[in-house]
Amino acid sequence: MGRVTTDVTGVPVPHHMDWPDLPVKQQPSWDDPTELAEVLATIAHYPPLVFAGEADILRERLAAASQGQAFVLQGGDCAETLSGVTGPNIRDRIKTILQMAVVLTYGAGMPIVKIGRMAGQFAKPRSADVETRDGVTLPAYRGDMVNGFEFTPESRRHDPKRLLRAYHASTATLNLVRGFTTGGFADLRSVHMWNKGFLSGPAQARYEQMAREIDRAMRFLDASGVAEAEELRRVEFYAAHEALVLDYERAMVRRDSRTGRPYDTSAHFLWVGERTRDLDGAHIDFISRVHNPVGVKLGPTATRDDVLALLDKLDPEREPGRLTFITRMGAERIGDVLPALLESVRDEAGSVTWVCDPMHGNTFTSPGGYKTRRFDDVVAEVRGFFAAHQQVGTWAGGIHVELTGNDVTECVGGVSPIDLDDLGLRYETLCDPRLNHQQSLEMAFQVAEMLEQ
Ligand code: PEP
Ligand code: MN
């Protein structure tokens, strides 16, 4: 990447990037500027986590999803934690996503574009800067990339060294993900194996039945001599996270040696969240300058003007696959709000990929004080998403879900229902509630049925 210079805020940036001084939300207040500068200079010289050519292939896959020729499955934790970066956790999340993808492929008969919300999802926007407990006020937890969850002054300080730990944790995660998805584990002959080690329930049983049918098909292909195809042995799997902490994302920008274009090499796909998507703010400016496929979350207050301005700013060339809108309207509001937005983009010849996040518009607090979501609301929002696209004549391009392979009790409902009273049994998320393994599989079956129609 070469020479590093310093911008107006003292942040080292690759010399080709002249970051403008724009309003910026949700950033850490690092406690040691000298240490921050050193950390960022180190990160700016570290190897990229992804290769620009991979991001380009993902752009083609997302282009297919924008035209109804593929469907996106994006999933993972709300917030990864450094202590959660373990082999079993990563394996079970990958297995869950592979299982969901098989269910969707089988139902939809179209390629599923698999994107993890992982290997970099270490920072969170917060509604308040501080948190008060028993009369003590400390900075809010902003994700392990910034500070610790433990409620002590030492843990809650915004420590620049955490950026290095997040980089290394992302590297280790991505390394294992690549091992699992290309080293034989993702071979379609292993569909049964992906179901092993999870609690059994109705969704797992339904999966077993489908896996038996896939086995038969595989035996048929083997017998016909066509089963050696690479496609059956490995899967393409992409990494994504919210581009939130701009110090980190800027330090990860590298020029593609083939074309000279800048990419944010911290992930294949980056999105900007609902709280930081101001048109004239630093986050949208940042993703407008990198050549990765990028996304923006759209909540229920997004207007036609917002959406068209984002389209012009982020995808002026109307390049298929470049821009994904991830809508998170809430099950109640999606039917009222989404169709007009779909129409306005369609009328501007925008070929964006539309993805449904059915989680963030359906969060509430249980009587026991747990942040939770109802499985039925999550499914209802996806149903509303498909209905809106059908009404306007556009393509429902995918789903974005917060999930874990672990057997947690964070969302209520599902076929082996978790009640509001059960939430305390195994509530482990430090941020938003995730679908557990059973609920994730069940959701995949329901979405597969919507895709079949
Ligand atoms: C998230 O994806 O965890 C998140 C904070 O979502 P949103 O930007 O949609 O609020
Ligand atoms: Mn979340």
Image: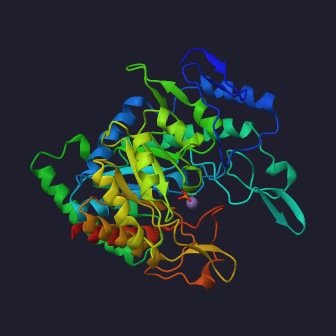
Furthest-top residue in view? 3
Total marks in image:
0
- Tell me residue 169's x, y (percent): 61, 41
Question: Which residue is at the front of the view, 146 or 289?
Answer: 289
- Tell me residue 195's x, y (percent): 39, 64
Image quadrant of residue 78?
bottom right
Residue at point 70% right, 26% down?
8
Q: Is residue 55 left or right of residue 49?
A: left
Q: Is residue 225 left or right of residue 199?
A: left
Q: Is residue 283 left or right of residue 156?
A: left
Query: 287 above or below 400?
Result: above
* Residue 204 seen in the current view: no
- Tell me residue 253's x, y (percent): 54, 29
* Residue 332 seen in the current view: yes
Q: Is residue 196 left or right of residue 25?
A: left
Furthest-right residue in view? 135
Query: 279 above or below 369?
Result: above
- Tell me residue 83's x, y (percent): 66, 51
Residue at point 17% right, 59% down?
217
Residue at point 62% right, 53% down?
84
Image quadrant of residue 268?
top left
Question: Which residue is at the front of the view, 135 or 410?
Answer: 135
Residue at point 24% right, 40% down?
230
Question: Which residue is at the front of the view, 316 or 3?
Answer: 316
Query: 311 above or below 160?
Result: below
Question: Which residue is at the front of the view, 263 or 342?
Answer: 342
Query: 253 above or below 200?
Result: above
* View quadrant of ligand 2: bottom right
